[in-house]
Amino acid sequence: MSAVAPPAAGDITREQVLDAYRTMRTIREFEERLHREFATGDIPGFVHLYAGEEAIAAGVIGHLRPDDYVASTHRGHGHAIAKGCDVKGMMAEIYGKKTGICHGKGGSMHIADLDQGMLGANGIVGGGPPLVCGVGLKAKVTGTDQVAVSFTGDGGSNQGTFLEALNLASAWHLACVFVVENNGYAEATSSRFHQAGVDVAKRADGFGMPGIVVDGFDFFAVREAAGEAIARARSGGGPTLLECKVGRYYGHFEGDQQTYRGPNEVEELRRDRDCLASFARRVTDAGLAEQSDLDEIDSAIARLVDEAVDEAKAAPDPTPDDVLSDVYVAY
Amino acid sequence: MSGAAIVGVIANPASGRDIRRLVAGASVFGNADKAGMVFRLLAGLGAAGVERVLMLPAADGLSVTLRRHLHARETVAAFATAGPFPELEELDVELEGTARDSAVAVERMVEAGVRAIAVLGGDGTHRVVARSCGDVPICALSTGTNNAFPEMRETTVAGIATGLVATGRAGDGALRREAALQVELADRATDLALVDVAVTRERFIGARALWRPDDVSELFVTFASPSAVGLSAVAGALQPLERGGGRGLHVRFAHEPAAAARTVHVALAPGLIVGVGVAEHRVLQLGEAVELPPGAGTIALDGEREIERRAGGSATVRLVPGPLTIDVDAVMRSSAGVAAPAQPAPG
């Protein structure tokens, strides 16, 4: 019908619907289970849970190829799962075991799998954006059409690293997409107190790139916007800043008493802003999936996470000799 | 009229960050620009004798910049010869950063007895105001490139026209009764559009903005301007209809080239010009209702997908009377030069 064809419509298939649901359910199950396991004291280090924000990881990373890149945050489990990291390897890593995805030496905040294009969770707030400029430049110099996506929170978006990366990506016209997961808190500080401006996306204007805002609880909103941003980057159209307004179901870290949040804030989020519940209702209403398909995925994921925890607990610890391996990388 | 002339101002600080910036190159004014627009609006209102302005406090630097302008006006010599400014009072509204802020503010303004409300925002902001303002006239001002309902115009002049309306000195034809489109569904509250309602086969609201015409099957408009941006331009290309004429248009799109009676080329979004195949169109009279064909999909109000519709549910679109708007050109035609307030400020 169109004389000038608009960009691809990107309607969704049944298979894509089930894949997205599987990704989101895996993240939710993984995180809810970690919440319970962390309370037992068996897990070393810090854990920052992604529950509530699953639609963003699934909606953005669902568009990426295995050879595309993701640079994540300290709240990185969701991105790693969506990018294809092995769930059992991740669980063992978080338990600090030798069978972990980084041989138990990284833990939650350093989960990385370069074979999957997962450049790593990152303990440095605002650490991801400069990394995607690096791989973005690599893609440009070597002439590939790979895309690099970084995730940052609202707190990270105030860091110099974030703004420097926007500048560099725009100046070098890199195939990067900067996703801001604005969950309203920089650790315990509300964005009302730390963030100049209602929308982080507006900061894109200063760097000459498009900045857009979507509802981060809505898989379909994220998917549509991210699809256009990633297609634009891949075809040489340069970087985009995509801000997803969202909320987290748990504290900044496990053990956070969250005294900075409203009395019913989390309960209301869980009741009214559950990306999985809304996704399930809408795809079954639309006839794209049956509830039984989703139930089947739920059971399979529950088994997978059970096994992951059992195997992680039973796995061996790294030995003192392991400290001396993986220290240097030969290029 | 008696008592002090009060005018309300709604300036949305958050308008215009949707996917059209990515797919079509749409742009909006920054909040520093919007603050300047409000400042100039106040100058116009003051010149026309408005003594008090109630404003929704605007986040994101808008109110801060506005206060700086106002401070400069009081302290910088160059402003000394300028006319009186209305007293600006920010409403004590707890901001949520959502459309609710504007709705609450409008209710408070109506309670306070404002005689007009100047709105700076997009179609969505105006829709929210129109639902709450009753018969208080709106001066509809655009703050971006992608709007069909509000006008892009210099706010100094809009302020003068709004002030003349508020002080009862505007001539005949100052106000226009707009039409609106009411969308009635079995399983949800009635909704309202000011410019257009589009029925699409897209299943999900997604990123909201409607920027792919391929899935649109039906379009309803409250007026049809050939120079509009957005879906209403399709109607404008078929049969132009004046604003406030009490007539709308119903357009059925053709999805097969063979079914198209004609193809029209329109600016669907800033920078995005598309050809749209049309099967048929006809005029809608005020009060007339059209039952939508059954089928799942989304319904877009003023260019944004708002409603996900289940298969089988009934849905009706009805052309109804809408808000009163200020016809700035008509006011200025009848009252040009009378903007001076009754008692100019000394000095």
Image (spheres, grey):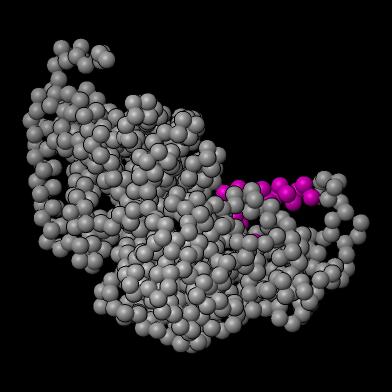
* Residue at left offset 9%, top offset 24%: A316
In the depicted structure, whether residue B134 falls above or below residue A94: below
Q: Is residue A113 left or right of residue A136?
A: left
Q: Position of residue A253 (x, y in %)?
A: 32, 37
* Residue at left offset 34%, top offset 29%: A143
> Quadrant location of residue B219?
bottom left
Farthest residue toward the front? B258
In the depicted structure, whether residue A175 falls above or below residue A291: above
Work out whether residue A56 can be spotted. Answer: no
Task: Report the quarter where the C terminus of chain A lies.
Answer: top left
> Quadrant location of residue B174?
bottom right
Q: Is residue B97 left or right of residue A244?
A: right
Q: Nearer the viewer, residue B201 or A79?
A: B201
* Residue at left offset 40%, top offset 29%: A133
Q: Nearer the viewer, residue B32 or A50?
A: B32
Work out whether residue B251 can be spotted. Answer: yes
Q: Position of residue A183 (x, y in %)?
A: 39, 46
Residue range in magenta is B55-73
Farthest residue toward the right? B347
Magenta includes A291? no
Q: Position of residue B94 (x, y in %)?
A: 54, 58
Magenta includes B63? yes
